[in-house]
């Protein structure tokens, strides 16, 4: 993957396929500028212990018509190659948590990428899912929770053109 | 700009029928498996989202699915419209997406050059 954001999007897409209603995404760069950490937590259908182990192997997938799942092995590979760690915790019926860290000074570390588009695209193309984003970098923090947005909107759908315009501008100004 | 400003959109919606939730006329589904994302599915959705906002297409929705195959034709999208066959486009990018919005979504004629399947 060319961007860390693409990995995040990919893992969040797994959460959505697993019927998650809430996906929490944390991106943190520590104060000492050593590590970048990404955590994605969902309330989807979860996996058994056995499956949690299998999916870290690139030759496993539950998708129809294809045996090979790439998303998780790719993220794990990038984290481990770039001086970081990876873990996956999951419980059937409760959800899944995925953690990946990366050494910021590693020469092969992909750029974080376009976080603004990543957030906007995830929110708008999954109107029935709630996302919370927490992005902390150089002591600056940005948070966005779609439950708060929906509370303000009442009956107006979050993927309405007027709301799209608003969110695009809001991300440009605050991210 | 604050989240409270969204209330204005809501208030406007209470007066303006155009703003209220419409039945979606067209649903666009973008494949967001690993291969779709790696091939640029985000840029495709971003282009749809921008066009929907710019043209005020309140009866068009774009959603994502993880269940997509055919890695060689990604990014792939499907266009669902009531009473019409599903049109599948392959090898999409932001520019092609803008053309699909203008010619197919708005004017009703699919862009045959990019169509890979009709079913
Ligand atoms: N958050 C999750 N909740 C439940 N199951 C998950 C989750 N993430 C992954 N899985 C399971 O792990 C499998 C492997 O995931 P992975 O992302 O590696 O490949 P994939 O999604 O099947 O295919 P792709 O290559 O398009 O990503 C999935 O098919 C799914 O069964
Ligand atoms: Mg996946």
Image: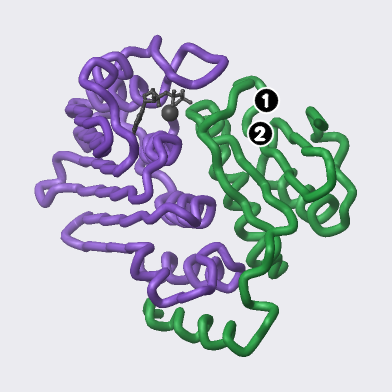
Chain colours: A purple, B green
> In front here: B57 or A130?
A130
Residue at 84% across, 44% down: B84
- For mark 2, does the 10 Å Cα neighbourhood hold few (<14), some (14 to 19), or many (20 or more) residues? many
Label 1 resides on the chain identified as B
Residue at 57% across, 39% down: B41
Residue at 64% across, 77% down: B19
Q: What's the distance in space between the residues labelled 1 and 2, CA to CA?
A: 6 Å
Q: Is residue A83 visible?
A: yes
Asked whether mark 1 and ligand 1 are closer than 8 Å, the reply comes as: no
Residue at 37% across, 13% down: A58
Q: Is residue A7 visible?
A: no
* A110 on left or right of B15: left
Asked whether mark 2 and ligand 1 are closer than 8 Å, the reply comes as: no
Task: Work out which quarter of the rendered image holds the N terminus of chain B and state it.
Answer: bottom left
The image quadrant that residue B5 belongs to is bottom left
The residue where tag 1 is placed is B73
> In front here: B30 or A76?
B30
Q: Secondary structure at mark 1?
A: helix
* B54 on left or right of A159: right
Residue B61 at x, y = what percent? 64, 56
Q: Residue furthest front?
A: A93
Marks 2 and 1: in contact by CB < 8 Å?
Answer: yes
> In front here: B31 or A6?
B31
Taking the image as four quarters, which one is ligand 1 found in? Answer: top left
Residue A158 at x, y = what percent? 50, 65
Q: Which mark is residue B76?
A: 2
Against B112, residue A63 (above or below) is above
Residue A104 at x, y = what percent? 22, 37
């Amino acid at each position: 993957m060319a961007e860390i954001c693409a990995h995040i999007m990919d893992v969040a897409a797994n959460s959505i396929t697993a019927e998650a209603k809430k996906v929490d995404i944390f991106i943190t760069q520590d104060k000492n500028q050593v590590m970048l950490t990404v955590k994605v937590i969902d309330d989807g259908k979860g996996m058994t212990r056995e499956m949690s182990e299998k999916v870290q192997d690139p030759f496993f997938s539950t998708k129809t018509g294809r045996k090979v799942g790439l998303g998780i092995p790719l993220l794990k590979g990038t984290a481990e190659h770039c001086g970081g760690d990876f873990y996956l915790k999951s419980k059937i019926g409760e959800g899944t948590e995925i953690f990946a860290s990366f050494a910021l000074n590693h020469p092969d570390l992909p750029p974080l990428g376009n976080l603004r588009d990543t957030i906007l695209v995830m929110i708008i193309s999954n109107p029935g899912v709630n996302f919370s984003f927490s992005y902390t970098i150089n002591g600056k923090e940005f948070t966005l929770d779609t439950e708060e947005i929906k509370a303000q909107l009442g009956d107006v759908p979050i993927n309405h053109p007027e709301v799209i315009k608003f969110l695009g501008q809001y991300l440009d100004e605050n991210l | 700009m604050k989240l409270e400003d969204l209330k204005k959109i809501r208030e406007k919606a209470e007066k303006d029928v155009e703003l209220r939730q419409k039945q979606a006329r067209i649903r666009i589904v973008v494949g967001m498996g690993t291969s779709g994302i790696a091939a640029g599915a985000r840029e495709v959705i971003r282009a749809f989202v921008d066009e929907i906002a710019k043209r005020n297409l309140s009866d068009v929705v774009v959603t994502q699915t993880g269940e997509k195959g055919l890695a060689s034709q990604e990014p792939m999208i499907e266009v669902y419209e009531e009473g019409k066959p599903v049109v599948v486009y392959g090898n999409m990018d932001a520019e092609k997406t803008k053309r699909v919005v203008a010619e197919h979504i708005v004017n009703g004629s699919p862009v045959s050059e990019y169509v890979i399947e009709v079913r």
